[in-house]
């Protein structure tokens, strides 16, 4: 008789997108990583096991066992890590929740979508290339670039100021609650309650 129970297979993947390394930690493009860190802190779990080209961990969300992922592939290749994990656990794209930044709206705002295009986001583009368009997503506002001549790459890799980080943290708190509803099959409720 074994002394421990074998952990059950995850029913969902919840992935925060970003770039690994200290230099990127508080940049706009790392909003997804920051959100997953908050989720892990709230659940007292670690996202520190290297698997599927990502830092991974497990957490219960909304009664569902979820694989938490922070891809180590850098943003533009995020889809490779998620495809590898979803293939291994036989999890369909409809149960792969991606959380990432969006420059279309201000810090503190989040938008929830059942599926869709990449909207010019390189990480989302990679996910679509590897998973198709039908994965749910939570997009975290990180602010629009200050003027049209500002290079978008420079903008998303710029560090957020204290006020922006406080607004993002608040949005991440709402995103975690929305994620709980989404993995319970309540995406419409999540959209109406937390989305803009």
Image (cartoon, rainbow, N blue to C red):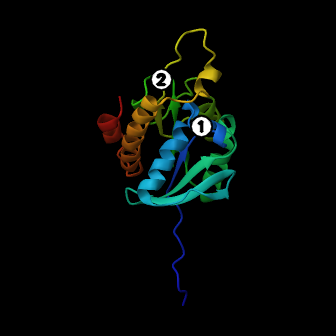
First in sequence, mark 2 or 1: give its number. 1
Q: Name the residue under label 1.
A: 132
Q: Residue at x 41, y 35 (%)?
A: 166
Residue 73 appears anywhere in the view: yes
Q: Is residue 19 above or below residue 54?
A: above
Residue 113 visible somewhere in the drawing? no
* Residue situated in front as seen by the camera: 173 or 26: 26
**Could you tell me which secondary element the residue under label 1 belongs to?**
loop
Mark 2 is surrounded, within 10 Å at the Cα level, by few (under 14), some (14 to 19) or many (20 or more) other residues, namely many
Number of other residues with Cα within 10 Å of mark 1, as a class: few under 14, some 14 to 19, many 20 or more: some
**In front of the other: 146 or 15:** 146
**Where residue 69 is drawn, which disc sits there?**
none
Q: Is residue 2 above or below residue 160?
A: below
> Picture coordinates of residue 167 (x, y %)?
40, 33
Q: In this view, does 25 lie to the left or right of 107?
A: right
Q: Is residue 127 above or below residue 46?
A: above
| Residue picked out by circle 2 | 143
- The residue furthest bottom is 1
| Distance of label 2 from label 1 (alpha carbons) | 27 Å
Instruction: Return the x and y of residue 79 as percentages of the image width and height.
Output: 65, 41
Question: Among all residues in the image, which is located at the extreme front?
Answer: 162
**Where is residue 18 drawn, in percent x and y?**
60, 39
């Amino acid at each position: 008789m074994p002394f421990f129970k074998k952990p059950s297979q995850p029913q969902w993947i919840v992935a925060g997108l970003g770039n690994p390394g200290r230099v990127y930690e508080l940049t706009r493009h790392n909003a997804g990583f920051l959100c997953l860190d908050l989720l892990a802190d709230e659940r007292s779990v670690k996202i520190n096991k290297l698997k599927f080209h990502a830092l991974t961990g497990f957490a219960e969300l909304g009664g569902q066992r979820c694989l938490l992922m922070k891809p180590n592939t850098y943003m533009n290749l995020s889809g490779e890590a998620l495809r590898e994990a979803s293939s291994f656990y036989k999890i369909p794209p409809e149960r792969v929740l991606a959380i990432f930044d969006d420059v279309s709206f201000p810090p503190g705002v989040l938008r929830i979508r059942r599926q869709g295009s990449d909207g010019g986001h390189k990480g989302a583009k990679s996910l679509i290339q590897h998973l198709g368009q039908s994965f749910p997503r939570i997009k975290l506002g990180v602010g629009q670039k200050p003027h049209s001549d500002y290079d978008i790459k420079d903008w998303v890799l710029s560090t957020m100021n204290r006020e922006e980080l406080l607004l993002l943290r608040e949005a991440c708190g709402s995103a975690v609650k929305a994620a709980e509803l989404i993995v319970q099959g309540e995406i419409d409720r999540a959209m109406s309650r937390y989305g803009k």
